[in-house]
C-alpha cells in the first residue's frame, strides 16, 4: 500500500480522534441511523478524553454521511476541532462503528479496509474494438473505448482464390484491431494505474490482445471465460481482485523470508520483532512494512516523540536520545508514521497467508542505500 495519502496526518501534533463508520447498509431509516451513530461516536470520544470541539467535528462529519452513497464505510481522522482526512473504505469495518482517542491516528486498519483494493480495467473485446470499464471496491465507471477497422471482420467458408484473399484481409483486420485495442489498453492502464487488466470476449480475440500488450503488463492480465457482449459480474471481478491480492502478499512474504538471511557483508535485508523494527525506523531504513493485523506485537506499547524517527521500546531510551517529550503509542501505528515520513510502503498479511511470519506479526524489508 502506498502510504503517501496519510502525510496530512503527520503534519499536525496529536492527540487524534480515529473513527471508522460502516455505511454498507442503506434503508429508509439510514439518515436517522447515521445521526444516532454520530452521537454515539462523539460520546465514545468524549469518554476517552477528546476535546469538545473535536467531538463536534466528528459528529458533524458523520451526520453529513446520512445521504452518502459510500458502498462500504468511511474513516475519519480529526484533531483540534477539524477533520483532517476522511478516506472511503473498500470494505466495511469489522465489528461495526468504533472510535478511539490516542496520541497517534489509528491508521493500521486502513491496510485491510482501504489499502489492498486493486483497481481493475475490464476490457470487453470483440473483433471491431473494445469498451473499457474501471472497477474497484468503490464501484465502477466507464474508462473509454477503442474502435478498430470495421470491415472485413468475418471469414468465409469457401476456398477459391478470391475468397482466400478476402480471408487474408479478414485476418489482417483482426490483427490490426487487436493491436489498436492493446495500445489503448496500455494507455488506459498507465493513466488509471490499474493493478489488474481483465480481458472479456471470445478466446481468439482475448488471446490476440493479450499477446500484443507490452511485456510489463503481461503479469497483470486475467482472461475471463465469457463470450462476446457479456458483462462481467461483480463476483467475477471480486474473485480476480482477491486472487491478485493473495498473489502479491505471497510474493512479498517470499521476498521477506529470503531477505532475512545476511548477505556477504553480513547485512540482512529484512528484520522482524519490535526492537529491531524500532532501530530500523530510527535509522530510516524501512522500505516496506509487513503487518499481520492479528499479530501480538501490533498493539505492543512503544514510546514516541514529536518527530517520526523518535521512537523507542522504553521511555528512558528516548530521554537518552535527547527527546524531552514522549507519549505511549501502539507499535504498528508508530511504525507506520515512520514509514510515511520516509516514503516506505506497507502491506497487510493475513494469518492464513503468513502463519507465524513475521514473528509477532511485524516485519520489514530494509533499504541500505
Image: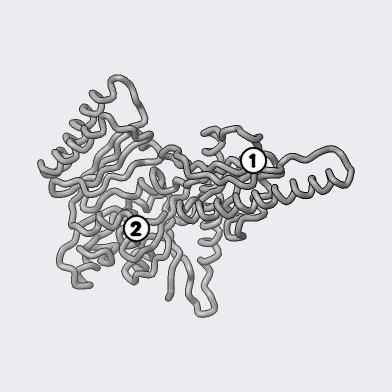
Q: How is the image coloured?
A: one colour
Left/right of residue 255 with respect to residue 307 in the rendered view: right
Q: Write the residue at 24% across / 58% down.
A: 10
Given residues 60 and 254, the one toward you in this image is: 60
Question: Label 1 belongs to which residue?
Answer: 126
Q: Is residue 359 above or below residue 72?
A: below
Q: Position of residue 43 (x, y in %)?
A: 16, 34
Q: Is residue 351 visible?
A: no
Q: Position of residue 312 (x, y in %)?
A: 28, 64
Q: From this viewpoint, which residue is outermost toward the right? A: 160
Secondary structure category for the residue under label 1: strand
**Picture quarter containing residue 276?**
bottom left
Secondary structure category for the residue under label 2: helix
Q: Is residue 293 above or below residue 230?
A: below
Q: Position of residue 120 (x, y in %)?
A: 50, 45
**Picture quarter containing residue 313?**
bottom left
Given residues 362 and 39, the one toward you in this image is: 39
Given residues 17 and 59, the one toward you in this image is: 59
Q: Nearer the viewer, mark 2 or mark 1?
A: 1
Q: Write the residue at 29% across / 42% down.
A: 75
Left/right of residue 318 with respect to residue 266 in the rendered view: left
Given residues 3 and 310, the one toward you in this image is: 3
Q: From this viewpoint, which residue is outermost toward the left? A: 52
User: Which label sits on residue 4?
Assistant: 2
Amino acid at each position: 500500500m502506498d502510504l503517501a495519502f496519510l502525510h496530512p496526518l503527520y503534519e499536525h501534533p496529536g492527540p487524534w480522534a480515529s473513527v471508522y463508520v460502516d455505511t454498507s447498509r442503506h434503508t429508509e431509516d439510514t439518515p436517522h441511523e447515521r445521526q444516532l451513530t454520530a452521537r454515539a461516536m462523539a460520546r465514545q470520544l468524549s469518554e476517552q478524553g477528546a476535546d469538545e470541539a473535536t467531538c463536534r467535528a466528528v459528529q458533524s462529519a458523520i451526520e453529513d454521511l446520512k445521504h452518502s452513497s459510500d458502498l462500504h464505510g468511511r474513516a475519519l481522522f480529526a484533531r483540534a476541532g477539524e477533520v483532517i482526512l476522511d478516506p472511503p473504505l473498500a470494505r466495511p469495518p469489522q465489528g461495526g462503528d468504533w472510535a478511539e482517542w490516542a496520541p497517534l491516528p489509528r491508521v493500521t486498519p486502513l491496510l485491510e479496509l482501504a489499502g489492498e483494493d486493486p483497481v481493475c480495467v475490464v476490457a470487453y473485446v470483440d473483433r471491431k474494438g473494445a469498451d473499457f470499464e474501471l472497477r474497484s471496491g468503490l464501484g465502477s465507471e466507464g474508462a473509454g473505448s477503442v474502435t478498430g477497422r470495421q470491415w472485413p471482420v468475418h471469414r468465409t467458408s469457401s476456398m477459391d482464390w478470391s475468397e482466400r484473399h478476402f480471408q487474408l484481409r479478414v485476418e489482417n483486420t483482426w490483427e490490426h484491431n487487436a493491436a489498436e485495442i492493446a495500445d489503448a489498453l496500455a494507455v488506459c492502464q498507465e493513466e488509471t494505474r490499474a493493478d489488474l487488466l481483465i480481458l472479456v470476449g471470445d478466446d481468439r480475440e482475448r488471446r490476440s490482445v493479450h499477446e500484443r500488450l507490452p511485456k510489463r503488463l503481461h503479469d497483470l492480465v486475467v482472461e475471463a471465460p465469457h463470450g462476446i457482449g457479456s458483462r462481467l459480474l461483480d463476483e467475477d471481478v471480486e474473485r480476480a481482485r482477491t486472487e491478485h491480492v493473495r498473489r502479491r502478499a505471497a510474493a512479498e512474504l517470499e521476498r521477506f523470508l529470503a531477505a532475512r538471511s545476511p548477505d556477504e557483508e553480513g547485512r540482512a535485508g529484512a528484520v522482524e520483532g519490535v526492537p529491531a523494527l524500532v532501530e530500523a525506523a530510527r535509522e530510516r531504513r524501512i522500505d516496506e512494512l509487513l503487518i499481520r493485523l492479528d499479530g501480538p506485537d501490533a498493539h505492543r506499547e512503544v514510546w514516541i516523540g514529536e518527530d517520526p524517527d523518535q521512537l523507542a521500546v522504553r521511555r528512558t531510551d528516548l530521554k537518552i536520545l535527547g527527546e524531552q517529550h514522549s507519549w505511549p503509542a501502539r507499535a504498528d501505528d508508530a511504525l507506520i508514521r515512520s514509514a510515511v515520513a520516509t516514503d516506505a510502503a506497507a502491506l497487510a498479511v493475513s494469518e492464513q497467508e503468513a502463519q507465524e511470519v513475521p514473528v509477532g506479526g511485524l516485519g520489514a524489508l530494509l533499504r541500505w542505500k
